[in-house]
Amino acid sequence: MSGCECKPDRAQPSSKDRRRWRPESMFITKKHLPRRAFLRGMGVAMGLPLLESMIPAATALSQTAANPRIRLGFLYMPHGAHMINWTPATEGAGFELSRILAPLKPVQDQLVVVSGLSHKNAGATAGDSGGDHGRSPTVFLSGARPRRTEGEDVRAGITVDQIAAATLGQDTPLPSLELATEDMTGLIGACDVGFSCTYTNTNSWKTATTPLPMEINPRVVFNLLFGDGSNATERLNRMQRQRSILDAVTERVTKLEKKLGPSDRNRMNEYLDNIREIERRIQLAEKQHGSNLSVPATPVGVPDDHEEHSKLMMDLIALAFEAEITRVSTFMMAREVSYRTFPKIGVPEPFHSTSHHQDKPETLEKLTKINTYHVSLVNYLLEKLKSKSDGAGTLLDNSLILYGSCMSNPNVHNHGPLPIFT
């Protein structure tokens, strides 16, 4: 890793290279920046998006360190779905989107709905009733049945995100990123009988006995991605002055832009504008908690509005992918046994209660609304990734995003066929 104040390399292509040059597979740039370049300032280490200047002159993109790598995102939703309104009626290219999946129309050409999957280890065994909400998050990405315990001796299995992070995360600042919108604070939900709350609060396990905590606070995530200060005093001073972390790297940005071509300058400006806008929204959320803000070791800053909270977390995922701060992320959009309500979409009843619909048409309609709403939030992330260039394609082209639940019909707590798409 290096700062951008270093002198750029000047690649000297051979005459043989020049004869073989093809514009569709190689880039001609006068200067070469390292892919892992950072903008550094007081308490700030800011990764950069992929720029043309990171590709050596007359070199095929696939043969450089700047060649885009795959990103993996795993989005989890509890409480299953109304499968009749989830499952598409047709198959193959150009299939007809179901009612719940309709928000994905803008990315349908890159969408695969996977039907017929089940997770048997999420269900109860003979003499082991209940516990479906406790098992589901853990089984979703591991397939391993968790140990039934309410103590600290939790045990499950390594999850696929951590298997991927062991390879994809070897040369990124963060091997993986674990996010959520709910935890046990504020009585958002309960834990399942017979199972430790650890099982319902995360779906990422580094080892069979090492669950990874999920972060719900956008400010904490922002600081983690961009190194904003090392202590509460620095953060409080910055918040009181309403300053941006970008202020700490202004001089470095100016120097860097002098080395960039027009296309890269536009890309950099868009990237920095996006960071500043996300930071502004986080600051707005912090104001909601009062002007006499005391900043503890873990700062406050969770938006009151659930949709804004979810979108902020997705924006942070997109930023982390774009700057290759990490290539692997998990996001629990809600925790099992969530009691969150959705009055903005006409569902004032708690999510968990609504999922136990008892086959009542009016309750099934409300569950469908919740399912559709969550899919629309996923589409927000997918369109965000689609809007970001990455090498010869987009971030979405170079990403695999999986969304789904470990329950099918929540009224009976079965675990197949599961609602899954990628």
Image (cartoon, helix red, strand yellow):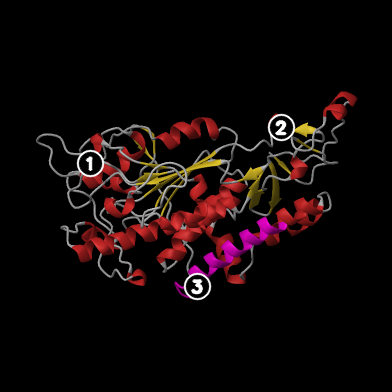
From this viewpoint, which residue is outermost toward the top? 16
Residue shown at 36%/44% (left/top)? 420
Q: Horizontally, is 328 left or right of 243 in the view?
A: left
**Residue 24 falls within the magenta-colored stretch:** no
Residue at the image position 74 percent from the left and 35 percent from the top = 25
Pick whichever of labels 3 and 2 is earlier in the sequence: 2
Q: Can residue 221 be seen in the rendering of this structure?
A: no
The amino acid marked with disc number 2 is: Thr
- Of pointers 1 and 2, the one earlier in the residue sequence: 2
Image quadrant holding the N terminus, namely top right
The magenta stretch spans which residues? 269-290
Q: CA distance from mark 3 to mark 2?
A: 45 Å
For mark 1, does the 10 Å Cα neighbourhood hold few (<14), some (14 to 19), or many (20 or more) residues? few
- Inspect the image, locate mark 3, and give the three-letter code of the amino acid beneath it: Lys
Q: Which residue is mark 3?
A: 287
Task: Tell me, for residue 64, which label it has, or none.
Answer: 2
Q: Residue furthest left?
A: 127
Q: Quadrant of the C terminus?
A: top left
Point 74% across, 40% down: residue: 54
- Residue found at the very far right of the displayed protein: 15
Amino acid identity at mark 1? Gly
Q: Which of the marked residues, 3 or 1, is nearer the chain's N terminus? A: 1
Residue 285 lies within the magenta run: yes
Q: Which of 340 and 148 lies nearest the eye of the viewer?
A: 340
Q: Nearer the viewer, residue 414 or 33?
A: 414
Q: Nearer the viewer, mark 3 or mark 1?
A: 3
Q: Is residue 254 left or right of residue 106?
A: right
Structural distance between the alpha carbons of marks 1 and 2: 49 Å
Q: Position of residue 315 (x, y in %)?
A: 53, 56
* Pointer 1 residue: 151
**Residue name at image x 29 percent, y 68 percent:** 347
